[in-house]
Each structure stands twice: as structure tokens, then as C-alpha cells.
Image (cartoon, helix red, strand yellow):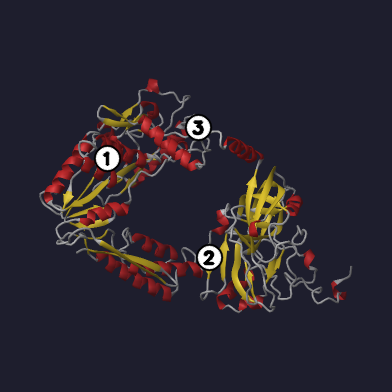
């Protein structure tokens, strides 16, 4: 032991991290400091949980095909960054972590677990090493809290398995090697480059670490720097001063528990004895199967209308009333409606729903807040510029006393909705086109009486009155499975009509997108027949098309309206052309990153017709993101100028007209399909041509 003034070692007089006169082991890095241990001669990072030397050679790669390769004298750097891990006593300790996108499991060294004072349930870990070898060792499953080195408020919880060594040590890269790349200079002080033993391997089971907040890239094949929730890291290849060759090896981690051992044993005992196999379906597949069976079993026709039971999760509907929460929400909504001047309009809409028999008033004697019930807070979207001034919204995502909403109790199930592109392609195919949307589609489906008590809401026509309890009789648009239930109702009617009206039944099943119908045929007579048959099918469940739109006057029922909308495009029926449906973005004086993102989002192009031009906007948006501007920071003049040109281009694209009909008038037979694709450094694209005889 000696004083720093008497130290004769080159690195003893100052700290590697802050260059003050104390030994590196006494350095206490505070939150908010940048990482400055980038001395080219700095010793590798000594983990606080240093264990035995690594037995694997080279940087780790997970789940890769085994191979050995000889490289030129370069150093490959995997994503490595310092993080803090919360100990048993509530303190944070620094560890060195690496990100492995090829591993499906996160690993923690056993030495680190001991120092942290953390333990968990025992299990057995089997690692499939490169070359077909296996390695097994006892392990523990532990939940740890990991925080950013500079901001302890940014903390994440992840599950890890303990191992003797998660992987080989990280390699040292000098600051001069990083500084060779100009695009990395601004972030070099934020990177950990001095290598060291890895105590934490983060796999893809913790996806938050793989979400890039910022990316700084240079020329192709040059290293890149990325920032995730824990900070910055660099990856890629750097020139090495040595000619040492490296050898890549990989591991694949799998866990084996006692329960899995027993299942495997039982499965082996059944082989050759019983002609069956164990179910390997995922939990999601099993839930979807249960949803479909439940929906099929509960879907019935009641007085000519489809009735369904709600697809509750295994725990069933809510067990406790949320009346007091809904009452507070009602008072808050009333103030908002009065402030916007739409209270009376909202009341008129509620009375319309009552007159249409979509809901009913609940008699006071049937109200008992001590029994299971659920109230949906009433909200309203006020749009004075449209014909429908107010649209009522019943909030099925409102949380109750236990932190769960009605939607949290409901299964989503599989997606019954057809492809939007398929519907648009069918509508564009032939000479005579037709479109229509189902009138109040969701409200035509009856909710089973047992489930109506979970679809109540509060309202009063005057703020001096006591709140009235209303109860929905029909399907509520805000319920999570509502789109799939409504689509299933339409499909049920189509199946019932398959024998009688096969073509129209197929049209309903394949070419309806939620409540929009779109199609085309060769002649007016065929369109007239198909639309009449669709009307007949829908009528069986009290569904109705508001009005059929067509480019043929004999079919069109819209009172000579020239334009109509279908799935995001605006159709000029008279010219038989369509444009993208959106108001012009206009001109902008001061642009921010948030504003630019909004402009790109406004350009709704489901078919990708203007994408060859619009891809430029997305590339410009990526450049904005990589540059690190804040969301509401006014952009520099040069970038402002570029985006103002983009706005002018968008305005031209929104005015561009496209022919609706794809099939030429004198086409013969089925078309040939010709596809072309190409890719560049910034984007790739594909196009399909149809060719008829």
C-alpha cells in the first residue's frame, strides 16, 4: 500500500475512469456520468463477479450453425454494455452485459447471483454446444431488476438462468479504433470498449433490450452504434493490431425441469402402445380453439337475429361492480360535454339508441351493486364538421378496482376479418363494380341475456337528475372481440345460405371487410343478381346494406352521388377512377420530428400505389430518427426545406387518379403474373404485372 504521489506505475497516478488522483478500484461512478474509461491502454473491465477463465473461444453467437472460420486480423465486437443490477438489499451493482439475439434464454453467472444475494427455484440446464456436444449443470431461475448505468429510473425486470459462465469475455477495442469511423465519434464517450468478463447474457426472451431507440450507421460493412433502454453499445468489425485468428463457436440453451422429464418419460412409455400423440399446441392456439368452439356453440338465431354469448376467459366475467368508478367518470364526462357545447347532442344520441331498441332502461328493483355487474363509461367524439356531429363510445377498457377492465376478462380469439388487399383487388377486377357498407353492423347482433348485465352504463338528461342505469342489448363496438363476433355472425348467415345462394354466400364470406362489401363482375346483370342475393342473405339476420354504390346507374342506389369511399380510397364512380382518401397536408411553417411522422402517417396507401415515391419520405424519417432530434425540437433550416418539398410532393400524390379496373375490356382467359423485385442500400421493392392475351 502506498500513496498515489509515490506510485511508480504508469496507471497508478490517476483513475482510468475520471483521471483524478485515486486508484481505479476506489472510483464511484455516479448516475448521470458518461463512461470515460476509454484509455487505449486501460485494463479490461474487471467484473465484480469475476469467475474462472472462459472455456469457449471467441465472441458468442446463439443458436447458430456450427462452423470454424479463419479471419483476417480484425476484431469482431458483439453488443456489450455496462448495466446495474439490484441486489437483495436494494443496492445497485455494476455488471457487464451482452445482447445475444440468437439466444432464447437470458443467463446470469453464478458468482454474480451469489454477490447479489439472489436465489430462485432449482432446475437443470442443458446446453447444446457447437459440434453436437452437450453440457448440463444445475441452475436456478431468478427474477432480476436491471437498470441503466446513468439513470436508475430506467429499470427492467427479466428472468434469468444461472450458469457458471454465460459466455466468453468481451474483447477490448481502443478509442482510436472507434475514432477511425467519423460517424461514431459523437457517441464514442458513451460506449464501453475496454472488454472484461460477461456476467449477464440477455437473450430474446427480454425483447425490450433489442428495441433500438437510436441507430448511428456509416458506410456499408462499417460498425454501427445503437442505443437501447440501458444505453449505447457498438457492434461490427474493427481492424486488429494482431494476426491472431479466432474461432466461432455457438451454444443453444434449453431448460429441463422435473415435470418435463416426467412428461417425456410418459410419452416414451406410450410409444408403440397407444396410437396417439401428446398435444403440442401453443397456449395461444388452444385459446383460439376454445374461442371458436365457444362462439360456435353459443351462436343462435333468436327471432331472426344472431345472438351470442361473450367469450369470457377462464376466470369468467368481473366479480365486483365498478359502479362508483363509472359514476365519477359520468360526472367528468358531463363537464367535458358542457364545455364543448355538445351535452344536448349526446343526450339525443342516447335517446336514439333507446328508441332503436339497442339498449334498455334497468328498473331500480333489478339493480344490486353487491352482485356482479359492469358499467361502461360513456365518452363522445365530437366532429362538428361532419354530418354525424357526435359518435358515442362506450369504454370497455376502463379499469375496475382490481386493475382489470371488461376487455381484460374477454378472449380476443382468432382474426375472422378478411384481407383488406383481397377485397380491394376483387373490387378492381372486372368492368362493373359495387360497394356497400352494413348499417350499424355491430348493433344488429344480440348479446345473450346472461351477459347483458356486464354492459351497463350511466346517463342522465339533466345534471340535476339522478343517474339512470341503461343496459346494452346488442353488441358493443368497444368490446375486444366485437369485430370478430360481428364478422362471425355474417359468416354464419352465409353458411346457412350456401345451398340456396352459393355464389353470394362465398362473396359474403370472402369479400367483406368488417362492415364493407366490395366486388365486381363482367356485366350489369351479374352485379344486379349478386347484390340482390347478398341482400337476401343479410336480411335473415336483420342486417342491411345502407345503399349500393356502382359505376352503373342501374345498380347505384346513392341518389346520383358521384363519390364514395371504400377502405381508405375515394372512388369517382362517374369516371371510374379513385384517389387516395385524405385531406391535403397543406403547408407547414415550423416542422418537428413529431410533425413529420404525422405527415407520413396521413398518406394512407393500402395497395402501395404511390410507395415508389413515398418510400423517400420514410427514408427521410429514418434519417431524422438517427440524427437524435427530440420530438418537438424545431428542425434546422436545411431539413425544414427538404420536408416542405416532401409536403408538396404529398399534395400531388393525393390528387393523382388511378384507374379502378384492372382487367382490359377485350382480355381473354386468365392472366399471366410477372413479378420483379430489386433492393438497394436504403430500400427494396417489388412489383407485379398482369398480362392477358
Counting residues from the start of the chain, the first of labels 1 and 3 encountered is 3
- Within 10 Å of the Cα at label 1, are there few (<14), some (14-19), or many (20+) other Cα atoms? some
Q: Is residue 449 above or below residue 598?
A: above
Helix, strand or loop under label 1 = loop
Label 1 sits on residue: 440
Residue most extreme to the left = 554
Label 3 sits on residue: 315
- Within 10 Å of the Cα at label 3, are there few (<14), some (14-19), or many (20+) other Cα atoms? few
Can the viewer see residue 106?
yes
Q: Is residue 569 above or below residue 406?
A: below
Q: Is residue 438 above or below residue 86?
A: above
Q: Is residue 252 above or below residue 502?
A: below
Identity of the residue drawn at 20% across and 52% down: 520
Label 2 sits on residue: 214
Q: Real-space Cα distance between discs 1 and 3?
A: 31 Å
Q: Nearer the viewer, mark 1 or mark 3?
A: 3
- Within 10 Å of the Cα at label 2, are there few (<14), some (14-19), or many (20+) other Cα atoms? some
Q: Is residue 495 left or right of residue 157?
A: left
Can the viewer see residue 410?
no
Q: Is residue 570 left or right of residue 110?
A: left
Give 85 or 110, whichever is nearer the viewer: 110
Give 578 or 443, whichever is nearer the viewer: 578
Helix, strand or loop under label 2 = strand
Amino acid at each position: 500500500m502506498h500513496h498515489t504521489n509515490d506510485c511508480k506505475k504508469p496507471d497508478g497516478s490517476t483513475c482510468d475512469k475520471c483521471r483524478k488522483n485515486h486508484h481505479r478500484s476506489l472510483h464511484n461512478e455516479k448516475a448521470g456520468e458518461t463512461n470515460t474509461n476509454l484509455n487505449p491502454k486501460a485494463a479490461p473491465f474487471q467484473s465484480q463477479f469475476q469467475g474462472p477463465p472462459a472455456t469457449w473461444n471467441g465472441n458468442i453467437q446463439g443458436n447458430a450453425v456450427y462452423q470454424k472460420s479463419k479471419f483476417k486480423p480484425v476484431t469482431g465486437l458483439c453488443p456489450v454494455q455496462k448495466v446495474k443490477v439490484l441486489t437483495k438489499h436494494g443496492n445497485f451493482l455494476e455488471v457487464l452485459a451482452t445482447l445475444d439475439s440468437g439466444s432464447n434464454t437470458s443467463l446470469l453467472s453464478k458468482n454474480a447471483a451469489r454477490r447479489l444475494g439472489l436465489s430462485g427455484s432449482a432446475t437443470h440446464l442443458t446446453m447444446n454446444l457447437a459440434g453436437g456436444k452437450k453440457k448440463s449443470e444445475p441452475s436456478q431461475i431468478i427474477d432480476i431488476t436491471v437498470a441503466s448505468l446513468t439513470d436508475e429510473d430506467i429499470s427492467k425486470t427479466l428472468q434469468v438462468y444461472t450458469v457458471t459462465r454465460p459466455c466468453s469475455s468481451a474483447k477490448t477495442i481502443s478509442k482510436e479504433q472507434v475514432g477511425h469511423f467519423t460517424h461514431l465519434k459523437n457517441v464514442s464517450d458513451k460506449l464501453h470498449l475496454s472488454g472484461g468478463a460477461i456476467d449477464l447474457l440477455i437473450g430474446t426472451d427480454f425483447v425490450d433490450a433489442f428495441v433500438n431507440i437510436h441507430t448511428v450507421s456509416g458506410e456499408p460493412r462499417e460498425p454501427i452504434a445503437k442505443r437501447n433502454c440501458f444505453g449505447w453499445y457498438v457492434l461490427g468489425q474493427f481492424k486488429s493490431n494482431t494476426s491472431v485468428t479466432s474461432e466461432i463457436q455457438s451454444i443453444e440453451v434449453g431448460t429441463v425441469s422435473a415435470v418435463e422429464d416426467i412428461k417425456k418419460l410418459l410419452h416414451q412409455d406410450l410409444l408403440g402402445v397407444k396410437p396417439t400423440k401428446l398435444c403440442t399446441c401453443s397456449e395461444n392456439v388452444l385459446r383460439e380453439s376454445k374461442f371458436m368452439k365457444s362462439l360456435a356453440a353459443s351462436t343462435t338465431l333468436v327471432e331472426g337475429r344472431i345472438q351470442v354469448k361473450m367469450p369470457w376467459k377462464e376466470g369468467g366475467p368481473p366479480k365486483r361492480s365498478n359502479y362508483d368508478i363509472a359514476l365519477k367518470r359520468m360526472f367528468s364526462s358531463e363537464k367535458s360535454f358542457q364545455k364543448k357545447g355538445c351535452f344536448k347532442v349526446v343526450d339525443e344520441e342516447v335517446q336514439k339508441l333507446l328508441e332503436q331498441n339497442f339498449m334498455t332502461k334497468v328498473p331500480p328493483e333489478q339493480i344490486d351493486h353487491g352482485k356482479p355487474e359492469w358499467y361502461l363509461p360513456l365518452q363522445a367524439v365530437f366532429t362538428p364538421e361532419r354530418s354525424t356531429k357526435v359518435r358515442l363510445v362506450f369504454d370497455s377498457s376502463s379499469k375496475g378496482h382490481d386493475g382489470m377492465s371488461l376487455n381484460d376478462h374477454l378472449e380476443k380469439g382468432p382474426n375472422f376479418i378478411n384481407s383488406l388487399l383481397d377485397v380491394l383487388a376483387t373490387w378492381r377486377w372486372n368492368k362493373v363494380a359495387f360497394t356497400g357498407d352494413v348499417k350499424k353492423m355491430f348493433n344488429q347482433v344480440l348479446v345473450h341475456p346472461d351477459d347483458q348485465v356486464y354492459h351497463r352504463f350511466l346517463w342522465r338528461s339533466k345534471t340535476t337528475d339522478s343517474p339512470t342505469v341503461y343496459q346494452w342489448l346488442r353488441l358493443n363496438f368497444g368490446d375486444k372481440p366485437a369485430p370478430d363476433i360481428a364478422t362471425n355472425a355474417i359468416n354464419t348467415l352465409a353458411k346457412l345460405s350456401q345451398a340456396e345462394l352459393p355464389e353470394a354466400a362465398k362473396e359474403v364470406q370472402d369479400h367483406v371487410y368488417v362492415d364493407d362489401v366490395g366486388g365486381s363482375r363482367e356485366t350489369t346483370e351479374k352485379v344486379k343478381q349478386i347484390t340482390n342475393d347478398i341482400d337476401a342473405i343479410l336480411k335473415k339476420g336483420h342486417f342491411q346494406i345502407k345503399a349500393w354504390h356502382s359505376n352503373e346507374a342501374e345498380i347505384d342506389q346513392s341518389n346520383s352521388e358521384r363519390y364514395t369511399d371504400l377502405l381508405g380510397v375515394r372512388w369517382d364512380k362517374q369516371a371510374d377512377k379513385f384517389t387516395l382518401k385524405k385531406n391535403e397536408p397543406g403547408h407547414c411553417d415550423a416542422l418537428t420530428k413529431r410533425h413529420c411522422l404525422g405527415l407520413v402517417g396521413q398518406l394512407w396507401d393500402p395497395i402501395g400505389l404511390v410507395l415508389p415515391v413515398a418510400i423517400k419520405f420514410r427514408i427521410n424519417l429514418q434519417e431524422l430518427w438517427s440524427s437524435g432530434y427530440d420530438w418537438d425540437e424545431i428542425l434546422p433550416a436545411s431539413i425544414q426545406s427538404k420536408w416542405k418539398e416532401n409536403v408538396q410532393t404529398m399534395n400531388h400524390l393525393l390528387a393523382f387518379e388511378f384507374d379502378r379496373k384492372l382487367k382490359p375490356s377485350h382480355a381473354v382467359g386468365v392472366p399471366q403474373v410477372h413479378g420483379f423485385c430489386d433492393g438497394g442500400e436504403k430500400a427494396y421493392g417489388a412489383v407485379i404485372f398482369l398480362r392477358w392475351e
